[in-house]
Image (cartoon, coloured by chain):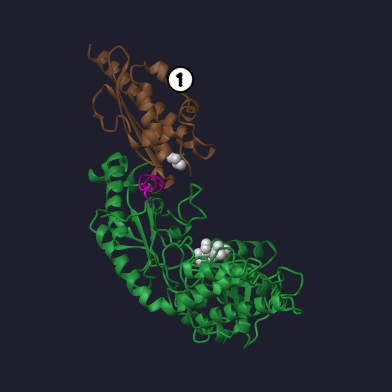
Chain colours: A brown, B green
Amino acid sequence: MAYSDKVLDHYENPRNVGVLDKDDPNVGTGMVGAPACGDVMRLQIKVNDDGIIEDAKFKTYGCGSAIASSSLVTEMVKGKTLEEVGEIRNKHIADELALPPVKIHCSVLAEDAIAAAIADIKAKRTEKDSSEAVAS
Amino acid sequence: MSSLNIPIYMDYSATTPVDERVAAKMAECLTKQGHFGNPASRSHPFGWHADELVEQARDNVATLLGANSKEIVWTSGATESDNLAIKGAARFNVKKGKHIVTLKTEHKAVLDTCRQLEREGFEVTYLDPMENGLLDMDAFKAALRDDTTVVSIMHVNNEIGVIQDIAAIGQITRERGIIFHVDAAQSPGKVAIDVNAMNVDLMSLCAHKVYGPKGIGALYVRRKPRIRLEAQIHGGGHERGMRSGTLATHQIVGMGEAFRIAHEEMDEENVRMGALRDRLWNGVSDMEEIYLNGDLEQRIPGNLNVSFNFVEGESLIMSMKDIAVSSGSACTSASLEPSYVLRAIGRNDELAHSSIRFTIGRFTTEEEIDFTIAKTREAVEKLRDLSPLWDMHKEGIDLDTVEWASH
Ligand SMILES: Cc1ncc(COP(=O)(O)O)c(C=O)c1O
Ligand code: FES
């Protein structure tokens, strides 16, 4: 299978590979996929008090397109608000990387990872808010 | 000093380059100056010469099998031979029974042929191999029925290189009067064949895995006791009616020469292949979490199939772009399914997803092996650094206990 230059670029030089502390209250972690399906994506976002994503890291087990999709996503989300990031659709990722039809599902996975990371940070924050409310 | 030609070919089980000696013989059968005649032309020397060459090639193929040249039928390749053998024998013997026994790790040319026969009302038992890839003889015996007419078991597996005990199977099928077909596409020049000692009735062969050209193969069809087939391709009645169509002289001559060389050089070549394969295995086997797929002993010397746990096969191939290897078989690597062969030998999905098949051959050098070792280690390390599963493994998390958000 031939890969687009953009996929190859992200694959050869993946951006923002790494791990953030998943217990940090400002970090949202999204892990999607399953080893049995041949793909697992972990996306982590660090959100500041203004609701802006300051940092993002990923690790991905999967094909080259899955790795490229998650690498691209870390670039796309940085500097954006959770609301803005929630608008990212797999189509944006697939178009940007020129993914062939059989690889669309890799970009869907990346969209799922974003949603999971947002859900995680939101859950953490509501928990925090409610515990603060009780304490006051 | 480096004489490495990049990319390095490590996919000899997918196909082989044509040996120069073979190409030279083939070239003599094409042009006006050469033996271009139709071997079926009985009325002039153009036909006679071509026919002579075809019969010489038939002898060469028969010799490698320990067969009589009258038992060789030319086809377009192993796929066609598998179709002709299984459909031909099953349909011819339909009054005796409609049950076929085969193995789950067979090539698709056998499995899909069996599926087609199922659609026509035949019943097929697909046996599970043991974990080492070999046929479980007890399960095999238990699967045979009074209405079993055809057994189809491959000799050498294309993915994991394991060698089935054909003689032991043949003894049983012969005793029970069941037709025994063997897909031996991967065997010539790698493991000795003797159709009589092995009691094989039908054997599929092709040239392009043995340094011959693509698009030519043969089916061995036993004469004593005589095996009868229903033809699948009808026409001018070539090949004693079993396979019509003008014989492709240059292809046939190529296959004959390839088989002659394979027969002559097998012992010597196997020693060399074995040493290279061991060098490759020794170069990677100390890495963590790697698994050899298929039995190490009952295996052709040129095959090494390894799963690199926590690394996905397609991305591994991508990062080993200087080395031509395959993940699963060439026929399935375009799809996203893990190898059905590895699933059949009981590998879990992760290991099945992380396999690489290295197959080495006549033109592989030590230098190429060393380069492959270095590139493989580098690629696996890079991808493990990227792998959340590797992180989890290192943290001591058992991945089987994790609840995955499957999609
Ligand atoms: C075991 C086996 N059977 C059948 C085939 C099909 O052979 P051919 O390409 O000659 O049709 C192959 C090769 O792909 C094979 O490895
Ligand atoms: S992640 Fe499954 S094919 Fe790319």
Residue A105 placement, left or right of B218: left
Which residue shows up at 54% across the image and 71% down it? B25
Chain under callout 1: A
Other residues around mark 1 within 10 Å, as few (<14) / some (14–19) / many (≥20): few
Location of residue A29 in the rendering, given as x and y in whole percent from the top left corner: 32, 29
Residue closest to the eye, B264 or B121: B264
Q: Magenta segment: does it hold B102?
A: no
Q: Is residue B93 visible?
A: no
Whether disc 1's CB lies below 8 Å from ligand 2 is answered no
Location of residue A4 in the rendering, given as x and y in whole percent from the top left corner: 46, 35
Residue closest to the eye, A89 or A64: A64
Residue A12 placement, left or right of B20: left
Total numbered badges shown on the rendered structure? 1
Q: Which residues are magenta?
A: B314-323
Q: Is residue B291 above or below residue A28?
A: below
Which residue shows up at 29% across the image and 59% down it? B367
Residue B302 placement, left or right of B332: left
Residue B23 placement, left or right of A52: right
Give SS at disc 1.
Answer: loop
Q: Which residue is mark 1?
A: A87
Residue closest to the eye, B402 or B68: B68
Q: Is residue B26 visible?
A: yes
Residue B325, quarter of picture = bottom left
Location of residue B174 in the rendering, given as x and y in whole percent from the top left corner: 56, 85
Which amino acid type is marked by label 1? Glu
Q: Is residue B163 above or below residue B159?
A: below
Location of residue B30 in the rendering, given as x and y in whole percent from the top left corner: 63, 66
